[in-house]
Image: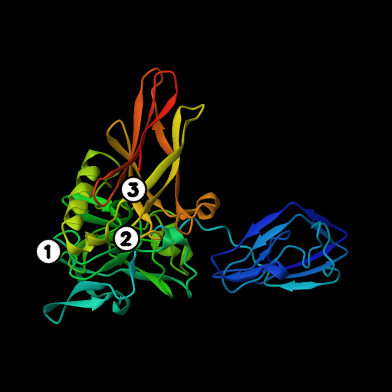
Amino acid sequence: MRGNLNLSNDTFANNTATGGMGADASASQNKAAGAGGNAAGAVYVEPTSTVTASNLIFSNNTATAGAGGAAATGYPVGSNGTADLISNSASVRNAAIQPTPPANNAPCYCTGTGILIWRDGVEIEVAVETLAIGDLVVTAAGTHRPIRWIGSRSYPGLSAPQHDCPVRIKAGAFADGVPARDLLVSPDHALIIDGLFVAAGHLVNGISITRGEAVADLTYWHVELDSHDLLMAENTPAESFLAAPGVRCGFDGVQALDAGAAPIPYAPRTELGRELAALRGRLAHRAVSSDEAADLGPIRAWLDRCLVGADGLLHVGGWAQDTAQPDAPVCLDVMVDGAVVAFAVASEYRADLAAAGVGDGRVGFDLGLDVRLASGVSHVIEVRRSADGALVCAKQIDSVGVWTALLAA
């Protein structure tokens, strides 16, 4: 709706509104602030509109605002959530509702990442946050290409959600001098390693490549060229920004860049399979051969949930703890009949484990797998520590569907 809106003697119920990414929130006032716009749980208006309301009833409405805005569900809301006690004759300005943005998994670099560029006739490395549109980056192929667009997104303080915390690739994790320094990228950021184009999150092993550390005032930077390519980040070939449909929605005033765009990826991504398992194995072996693996200790672990749903898909859950580092998350490979089907990090909180004194209780994992087990035959489920391939627990399901524990560490 655009313009002014007068409402009277109306009831608004069971509505939900969501704005942009949030920054601050006040649960006691049923309002949240954040990047983009305001949300009103019952009334949809444009940012320049004025709403004048009288004798209205709001019930069971939900509003979540974007950064810089306010959300109103009918506030304050009584304990039964059925009445708005202050909406009568109220005027609401700028009560704009933004659509919920999709999860932003765009490839990006953390502040401080060194990017190789060509300037004044020489190759130099500069921090990603100092780049400018028009700068010439040096690609992995050695060509010089201008930057088309630069974007950023930030999490103030320690507000970054766990799933979007960066992957840290330690210096030398891939090869001597690769990376040259620790490289921090978003989990879905793809790199070329051993000829494979693979997301950083798929390479986590808990030693040389880690994920989930808290970074204060985390800022991700996106660097786009005229086509998808490989930049040199800390001497590591890593992808530029790829403007997939909708992924740029978290940035202001840049949608026109994507008009009519059909971006072509640099290469197909390598997903779960033999090639990725071999790469992870090589990187894990390199890690455990270094001094960084000296703190690896014996593992305590258990698969306490293995089931096959009515659709035939496998679900597994359990816990794992490194006795040398009892509160540190353990990276795991989940295997079915000898093939790696998933990666997991044993870091989920479980109250039963905390009560039993298993570290701080944040050692659990729970996975629904896109793996369909053939009926009438036996299958073996194994869980191995990613860092060294050590088998930590296993179960077998027989031809009639009975599970038997084969190993519990």
The residue sitting at 56% across, 64% down in the picture is 20
Residue 369 falls in image quadrant: top left
Q: Quadrant of residue 274?
A: top left
Towards the viewer: 201 or 247: 201
Q: Which mark is residue 210?
A: 2
Mark 3 lies on residue: 332
Q: Is residue 227 visible?
A: no
**Amino acid type shown at disc 2:** Thr
Q: Reading the chain from its start, which is encountered first: label 2 or label 1?
A: 1
The spot of residue 49 in percent (x, y) is: 70, 70
Q: Which residue is situated farthest in the bottom direction here?
A: 120
Residue 331 left/right relative to 310: left
In three-dimensional space, the C-alpha distance between marks 1 and 3, rounded to whole angstroms, equals 25 Å
- Residue 244 rendering spot, x and y as whole percentages: 38, 54
Q: Amino acid at mark 1?
A: Asp
Q: In whole angstroms, how far apart are the C-alphas of marks 2 and 3?
A: 12 Å
Q: Which residue is labeled 1 in the image?
A: 176
Indicate whether 112 appears above or below 285.
below
Amino acid at circle 3: Leu
